[in-house]
Amino acid sequence: QVQLVEFGGGLVQPGGSLRLSCAASGDIFRINTMGWYRQAPGKQRELVAHITSGGSPTYGDSVKGRFTISYDNARDTVYLQMNSLKPEDTAVYYCNADFYLPEVTGTTESWGQGTQVTVSS
């Protein structure tokens, strides 16, 4: 069984910073991509950023230039550095991993439980 454990949510003032981390554990053969999605009340879940195991990132338009995603291959851990936070960044942030299991063709997807990020003065 694969688990994703998230850390780092909380309350921050506008213009502030937060760092999220998500560690994958379990019987993973190889990570394909890891990343973050978010969902605000009344809105659809949207991509924040994801990164391949080779280090190629993709960002949602609303966070480009403010957020940075990175990946520690040795620890199967993804980080999201969030700077210049805005009230509209308030949401539950979900970690996502796409990975290969031993002796299974194709990739499998898993989600974390979510961590609340609130940007408010």
Image: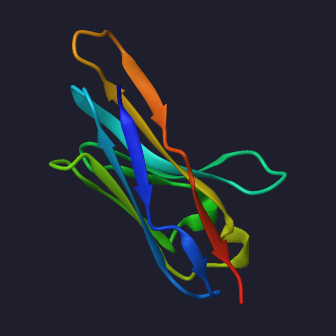
Residue 110 % position (x, y): 46, 32
The quadrant of the picture occupied by the N terminus is top left
103 to the left or right of 80: left
Residue 79, image x, y percentages:
36, 61
Q: Residue 69 placed where, x, y %?
A: 39, 60
- Asked if residue 73 lies left or right of residue 106, the reply is left
Asked whether, in this view, residue 77 is left or right of residue 98, the answer is left
- Of residues 7 and 65, the one drawn nearer to the viewer in this rendering: 7
Check the image and name the residue furthest to the left: 74
Q: Residue at x 54, y 86 (%)?
A: 16
Above or below, 108 relative to 58: above
Please give left or right for residue 89 compared with residue 96 in the image. right
Q: Residue at x 44, y 48 (%)?
A: 35
Q: How is the image coloured?
A: rainbow
Q: Is residue 45 above or below residue 106?
A: below
- Nearer to me, 27 or 56: 27
> Residue at the spot x=61%, y=59% of the render?
61
Q: Position of residue 25 (x, y in %)?
A: 28, 39
Front residue of this view, candidates 55 and 116: 116
Query: Residue placed at 68% from the left, 68% from the top?
Result: 90
Which residue is at the front of the view, 85 or 57? 85
Reply above or below: 36 against 65.
above
Q: Quadrant of the C terminus?
A: bottom right
- The number of numbered badges drawn on the structure is 0
